[in-house]
Amino acid sequence: MNDRYRDVAGVTGPVFLPRDRGYDEEVAGFNRAVVHRPAVAVGAATADDVCGAVTFARRNRMAVAVLNTGHGPSLPADSDTVMITTSRMSDIEVDPRNRTVRVGAGVRFGDLVAEAAPLGLSPLAGSSPGVGVVGFTLGGGASLTLGRTFGWASDHVKSLDVVTADGRLRHVSPHHEADLFAALLGGKSNFGVVTAMECALFPVTRLYAGALYYSAEHLRVVLNAYRQFTASAPEAVSSGVALIDLPPLSDLPSFMQGTPVVSVRVSVVGDSGMGARLVEPLRRAAPLVMDTVADIDCADFASITADPTTPAAAIEHFGLLREFTEDTVDAVAAAGPDGHTGVNIVDIRHLDGAFSRCSGPAYAIGARDAAYAFFTLTIVPPGQGPAAHRDAGPQFIAALRPWLHGRSHPGFLGPADATESGTRRAYDEDVYLHLRRTKAEFDPDNMFRVNHNIPPLTPNP
């Protein structure tokens, strides 16, 4: 490897080449099925470091990739790429009077919640403390704790700091370079490297929240009860249902050790009495294996889903549903983890509510009429490659074809969607055209292409 790749001018953070100690750890994401081997990795500590890395990439005609901070899907970065990691950019500045926060690109929700909760405020958080705030929000951000009450996280962004392909740091907002600002909200990393974000916080300190666990033998009964629950749930309720069939992992509860279960996750904004009345039909739907739904601090949001925190290799697929009927329940039950498709987790999230309304400049966050979002996850056993497991998710999605939404969503795109047609389905036609025009203005050479790529619009010959 040519040592000229180490000479990234003006960078104060560490620079790694493939043969360096620490390189493998620097470029490793949460999902170990995606392997990154960039020519150089820049551990950005400041926005100036990002400017230097992007300028270096432009001079050397290389692509730029940003390592996802948390759980989000990513695409492999190869030897033609400068990878920027932002975990060192972890500043958090809460403004309690205006109920806003400014976060660096490397901040995760666990750290943000810890800062905001003592001030009586909460963000629209992802389901796990390890989820990156900026990446989650740029894709829309469907919060399982507060989403149906307040909507997409992207609708509540006030401003962004972003380094564009010319190596320039820009501060963008609805009032300054508004086209670029709006394009980033849904277009994600196609237009530059976001180094900081200002967004709203919400005066919520308590939730009636947690999970109800049932044996998978009651799958159809529970799914139908959940379907009826969501049909009348007020916007104060955010929820999801997960079909889980995991191998006997040491950090799982004993009742989940190699045994399929169904988990209904709920989060109610309001007093616990109202929450208990709303959840009661779910409690009576089938015998419970475990019930963790209780009055909790918002700071304990991670207990709702109890997502794993250890990186692992997995294959993910995503989709949207127009509706969830009795026939949909039958299809899910037949094709889910208990249906021998190889899928380990099917996670279905209720949308609608405030998700259906556009209350901000994030026009690229479309498909707001979708009723549910879902994803499948298939664990890749140690020592096996991911190729043998890639068909598990598509089989499940094929079974749901009659109820699929006609569009996808920028926040629910997996590696399998990283094609021109797959990415294009996440946007309405006029939105996609506008994003391509914005791309041509700010990244005409498509440096930011290691993603669900939106190519620049080229002029007609």
Image (cartoon, helix red, strand yellow):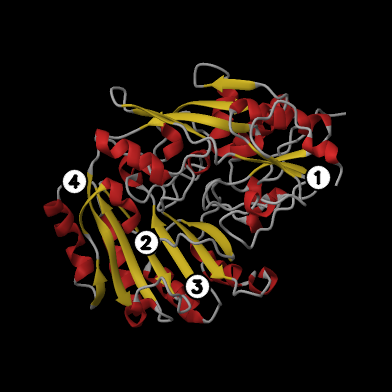
Question: Given the current orientation, which residue lies at the most extreme front position?
Answer: 21
> Decide: marks 2, 1 in contact (CB < 8 A)?
no
Q: Position of residue 166 (x, y in %)?
A: 73, 24
* Res 94 visible: yes
For the residues marked 3 and 1, what is the alpha-carbon distance in whole angstroms?
A: 34 Å
Question: Element type at marker 4?
Answer: loop
Q: Tell me which numbered mark, 2 or 4, is placed earlier along the sequence.
A: 4
For the residues marked 4 and 1, what is the alpha-carbon distance in whole angstroms?
A: 51 Å
User: Is residue 195 positioned above or below 111 on the image?
Assistant: above
The residue singled out by tag 3 in the image is 344
Residue type highlighted by circle 1:
Asp
The residue singled out by tag 2 in the image is 306
Q: Tell me which numbered mark, 3 or 2, is placed earlier along the sequence.
A: 2
The residue singled out by tag 4 in the image is 270
The one nearer the camera, 450 or 277, is 450
The one nearer the camera, 169 or 87, is 87
User: How many dots with numbers?
Assistant: 4
- How many residues crowd mark 1 within 10 Å: few (<14), some (14–19), many (20+)? some
Question: Given the current orientation, which residue lies at the most extreme top position?
Answer: 176
For the residues marked 2 and 4, what is the alpha-carbon distance in whole angstroms?
A: 22 Å
Q: Tell me which numbered mark, 2 or 1, is placed earlier along the sequence.
A: 1
Residue type highlighted by circle 4:
Gly
Residue type highlighted by circle 3:
Asn
Q: What residue is shown at x 19% (from left), y 72% (from top)?
A: 284
Question: Element type at marker 1?
Answer: loop
